[in-house]
Amino acid sequence: MLQRAVIIGLMSGALLGNAVSAVAQKTKSAPFSYLPEQGTDRYDMRVPHKTLALADGSGFIILAHQSAGGYAVERYDIDLKKQWSTTIPVGPSETLEAFGRGSQQALVVLHHKDGDSQNLTVVPVSLQSGQKGAAKMVMSAPARDRRPGVSISPDGGRLLAFRYLTSNQQVKSIAATLFDQNLAQLEEKTYDFRTLSDFFSPAVHVANDGTQYVTLISEGMKKLTVRRYPAGPSTEIKVLGVPVGGVFGGRAVTVRDARFTVLNDGSLYAAALCADYQTGEYYSLKVVKYDFSGNGDMKFSPEFRFTPAYLTEVSKASGLDVKRLDDIYLGELLLTPEKQLIVVAEKHYEEGGSEAPVHARELHVFGYNEFGAPTWHSIVAKDQVAPAVDSYTGIGFRAAVFGGMVQLLTLENINKKSDLYLRRVNAQTGVVSAPERLKLNVADDQQLAYVKDFTAWLNEKTIIGVSRPSKKSAALQLDKIVVK
């Protein structure tokens, strides 16, 4: 009865979503220079967050692509006053790899590739003065090898650079080097996978204390595995894996999309959308918590099945006759202070071809209690369309958690008002508030009007964004919005 009551409450909340309130006010704006990425880089999601709030609450830093030859790291105070700007030149054979910040420095990571070799170089920038430090090469590899990568810890205190060693396209090992926030080398490790028969999508994550996690999808896209490598001289490797696919009722079910995230309780969480291997029909959402404290343990949440009843809910929310789920991708895993997990997925697709318009439709939001049990779900209807050049920067959503409330920010046109809209999701009950218009009056002319990469929360009531306020203006502006 409780589950049913929650769903009824959510349906009532969906009806309220038709009424749009305007409860926010823009308090500041400043000119902003930005050049959209060109070529394949415009689809590159290596750096999806280009505005980072400072830990002490004094302001934020931005990484802006201002010219074909480089980026700029800029620091602003909470009133949008620019305190310094530092240019980071980027050559023709270089691309942006990562952006992060610690307590003392911003870190810009560049990938360089020429005919014989490739490498990753970190350019440190002082948060206090904006002065660039000496660039440091943190990883190199032959040009023919897979592109190396980096992982920056959530607090920016550790940077892990790594390269892949392969044989016949299969990763056999990963060589990794750990650095502190001043780019002093701390240790080197090798992750050996030669005993594994087959696996896919290896990814590397580093925690604030330097602990390293390698995440894998293995056993024919049916198992989620995490291998933990502690920082320091210890060689102990802990491996936790759980099957999420298999044969159910004669149907072969495999992982369609998966996301691993180290969240603020120090544990690593994974979510997987599973689908029928033959038909592609979405089957279920599965969530796992990997807790390596003590003896190490896993908490495998009961699966959420995509039943005909769920398709009926999607149809009611979207206004379309939905016969099956398609093009749903995991977007965010969020954790409240009370250990409630929120999983957000989004429908995202192209009309046809890489140059065709891109659509971002409804959000599928799932709530789990502190014991890992699914307690509610909600479908947030939206209708976003963008030209291909803006497919990953102009539409989609941004999310943040404050206390027991999740904030969702989208660019939409509701009741003929093109604007940024804020929705609040109660993490305890799943009830979604009506969309609240932030009163930026974002231009709606299929030109660059909003750059999602620069959206960030300084606190629960203060949001930073970059938008173009009207069709008559060709220039973007940096916005500070205070929510009442």
Image (cartoon, rainbow, N blue to C red):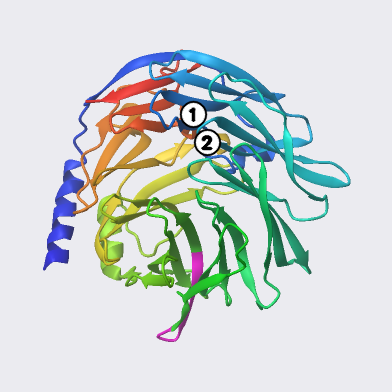
Q: Tell me the magenta residue range.
A: 248-256
Magenta stretch: dominant SS? Answer: strand
Residue on which the image places disc 2: 102
| Mark 1 element type | loop
Tell me, yes or no, whether the highlighted magenta stretch contains residue 255.
Answer: yes
Instruction: Tell me how far mark 1 sits from mark 2, CA to CA.
Output: 37 Å
Q: What residue type is labelled 1?
A: Gln
**Residue 299 in the image: x percent, y percent?**
36, 70
Say few, some or many: other residues with alpha carbon within 10 Å of mark 1 (under 14 / 14 to 19 / 20 or more).
few
Please name whichever residue, 343 or 231, is drawn nearer the observer in this view of the structure: 231
Looking at marks 1 and 2 on the same chain, the residue that comes earlier in the sequence is marked by 2
Residue on which the image places disc 1: 446
Disc ID at residue 352 = none
Q: Which amino acid does label 2 sit on?
A: Gly
Q: On the image, which quarter does residue 113 sit in? A: top right
Q: Residue at x 25, y 55 (%)?
A: 316
